[in-house]
Image (cartoon, rainbow, N blue to C red):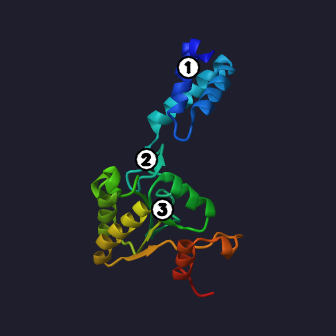
Amino acid sequence: MTDYIESLQRLSEQFSKLQGVGRKSAMRMAFSLIEFDDESAQEFAQAIIDAKRMIHRCPLCGNLTDKDECYVCSDLSRDTSIICVVEDVKALMSIEKVREYKGVYHVLHGAISPVNGITPDKIRIKELIERVGSGDVNEVIVATNPTQDGEVTAMYISKYLKPLGVKVTRLAYGIPVGSDLEYADEITLGRAIEGRRDV
């Protein structure tokens, strides 16, 4: 039936362009949106336009912001001697939710992936090296994902930062809180042991 309603089909197609949204979910969103009154629909459309127009990368760390600098970089209470390197803004937001980390960030906007044609020059590694080389940075925490691409990226970063005299650390990957050891895979257990610390 929706094939005959061209405008609804076009709307659904736009929603399906969003990451993680399948055809059925996109159509549900489209049906939901046409239930909006005119004012709500206008607000929805304007919110998309405003976000696209105003949100940009922080010139210092690469986080997303609608200000001159992101909320982390503009927070004078943050420890600028520690930089946590993440692949994307979603990872940054996950770390922020924990409320344990008090340093600053550097967002790469990707990971080195030769298979996918992503070379070091296509992500923000050069900016990281320049940032570490020109500032009072004592430690760089490499918090790239525990994937093959993430590990390659971490090794590449470490190779170029260690000669600068900065401490380079990697997040310890261990057993999730509340889970049993018998259900953990070998890689997770191995990393948990390697990343052990005094208690």
Residue 154 higher or lower than 118, as above or below: below
Q: Quadrant of the N terminus?
A: top right
- Quick one: SS at disc 3? loop
Residue density around tag 3, few if under 14, some if 14–19, many if 20 or more, within 10 Å:
some
In the rendering, at what x and y percent does residue 84 appear? 46, 66
The CA distance from mark 2 to mark 3 is: 28 Å
Q: For this rendering, which residue is in front, 188 or 111?
A: 188
Residue density around tag 2, few if under 14, some if 14–19, many if 20 or more, within 10 Å:
few
| Residue 144 position by quadrant | bottom left
Going 37% across and 51% down the picture, which residue do you hit?
59
Label at residue 145: 3
Label at residue 9: 1
The CA distance from mark 3 to mark 1 is: 37 Å
Mark 2 or mark 1, earlier in chain: 1
Label at residue 68: 2
In the rendering, at what x and y percent does residue 7 appear? 55, 15
Residue 178 higher or lower than 56, as above or below: below
| Residue 83 position by quadrant | bottom left
Q: What kind of residue is marked 3?
A: Asn
Specify whether 9 is left or right of 154.
right
Q: What kind of residue is marked 1?
A: Gln
